[in-house]
Amino acid sequence: MPSDACALVRNRRHDRRLPLLRIALVSTTCMLIDKASCLSSRSHPAPKRKQVLSKKADGSFRKFTFDGGDSDRSDSRYWYPANIKQALKVRRLENKIQSALSSTFLPAGYPKRTPPGYLTYSMWSWVQDLSTQMRGVLATQRVLEGVGVGKEGATALSASLNFIVRDGCGMLATLLFTSVAASKFRADIKRWRLFADLIVDVGITLEVAATLFPKAWFLPLICVGNMCKAICGVAAGSCGGAINLHWAKGSDISDINAKFGAQHTVTGGLGLLFAALFTTSISSASSSVMWILYAALTGIHIYANTECMKLVAFDSLNTPRMMLLASQFFSQRECDTSTCTADTMNVMMDPETMSKNKEPLFFAWRRPRNLTYFPVLVGISFNDFAKLSGESVSSLQETVTKAAKKHYLVSVGRRKRGRGLSVLLSFFASATPEERTKGYFHALLLCKSLEKQGFRPRKGISHFRSYEKIKMAEEGATNAVEKSWPKFREEAAKAGWKLYLSDFSTKGYELEIK
């Protein structure tokens, strides 16, 4: 073989028995052969080794190479220096720990299979859990002091009776609040969830402050405080399922619930530890210092919850989100290209942008300026519709016949209380969520049409059905919705809104024709 000859020549280059000319010729030939083989290897590189990765949902994986077998065990076939072997062992240990933590606290497929912002949401949730735990231990300490723990003359029977009355009030509040508000949670998840956190702050504050009042006020205060906590349990439990379902998009809801449970277990344990340190450190502090620290923890709790709600970007429309989208849509249609600002010329807001910047998180909020303040009575009964609209029986029959195709009724009417006009909106039981969205869009256009005709929300009008402008406003809104609704639906779909999931706050009535 030429390579063997070359090796022989290289090894015996200084052997005097070989003629110098022969050595020179063979050496030159070997150099040419080596160069040719090098060029051949560059033009025809060796095939890349194929590998198969076996991945788990928690992010861990194993690698198999066809020419090397199981790569998890293949390192023993090679020699490594001692320091590199130690580094590889540390790296494997780090990967195992990371995989264990991920499988315990993060959902399967994170972050690819969860909506953006999940980890930030979890961190803010941990902060509010810690603040609640620390304040809760302080409230428990105050309640125990109030029932006489550590005082002479206090009996176990009196303390037990206080707790029985307090817990009974909490159970009663749970039943009453469930019967009143259970049907309203679905249409306003985020605001009811924040309401739950605010009402639990009120309950904890009442328990902490109960010992500062006369003894006769102690039991009523802790009863009201426990009722607030019970209301929080109902609202938070109902809304928490919908929020977890939002984070389960592309994942498993049972896995999301389990991981949130594991996170709350850890934060609960840390909260107890910090609470013990907190209560012992302020035991000798003055009352003013204690209340300053308590107010700071309460402020942190409220801020953390608002940040959590901003990260939950629902892609369905409810009443506030519908008003904000309609306001932006009307602004884009009404402004001229010369007077439009950069904000009004942009496309419709997507769910993430609205959730972080625009969506109201509290029940007290003002409508956008370009939407009139005529109240929209949504989901009223047909009895109220007939009474407030002021139409005759024949007109009502004609209206119902025409509305059967649209699956909703919309009309101008009086307010239930006070002076002025309102817009009435009733849905048929067969109306789909998208048709309900169209009905609400029609109602908002009717509000604007009333304003164009010169009517004002607070101005009282007797026999308003005799006004020709009322009919003109209703006809104008009907024509406008046929022109604007297809465009609104198209832009909303492009922005990521799912109109087939819309859910509005209503009075609870739906119409059926029999």
Image: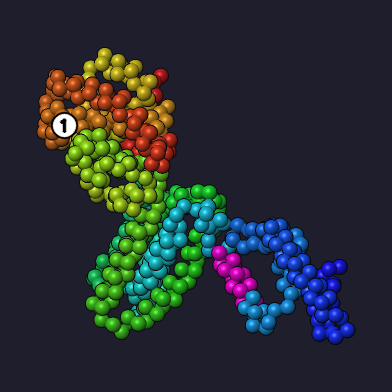
Residue 260, visible in the rendered structure? yes
Residue identified by numbered label 1 = 451
- The residue shown at (48%, 71%) is 269
The vertical placement of 25 against 171, above or below, is below
Quadrant of the rendered image containing residue 409: top left
- The residue shown at (36%, 23%) is 406
Amino acid type at mark 1? Glu
The vertical placement of 426 against 7, above or below, is above
The vertical placement of 42 against 20, above or below, is above
Indicate yes or no whether the magenta region holds residue 136. no
Indicate yes or no whether the magenta region holds residue 92. yes
Quadrant of the rendered image containing residue 116: bottom left
Q: How many callouts does the rendering have?
A: 1
Give residue 332's position: percent from left, percent from top: 26, 37
Q: Main secondary structure of the magenta part?
A: helix
**Pick the front one: 291 or 19:** 19
- The residue shown at (40%, 39%) is 494
The crowding category of the residue bearing disc 1, from other C-alpha atoms within 10 Å (few below 14, some 14 to 19, many at least 20), is some
* Magenta segment: 89-102
**Pick the front one: 233 or 70:** 70
Mark 1: which secondary structure?
Answer: helix
Residue 257, visible in the rendered structure? no
Q: Is residue 384 left or right of residue 34?
A: left
Quadrant of the rendered image containing residue 90: bottom right
**Pick the front one: 47 or 496:** 47
In what quadrant of the picture does the N terminus appear? bottom right
Give residue 216's position: percent from left, percent from top: 26, 68
- The residue shown at (46%, 49%) is 246
Q: Most extreme residue toward the right, as rendered?
A: 17
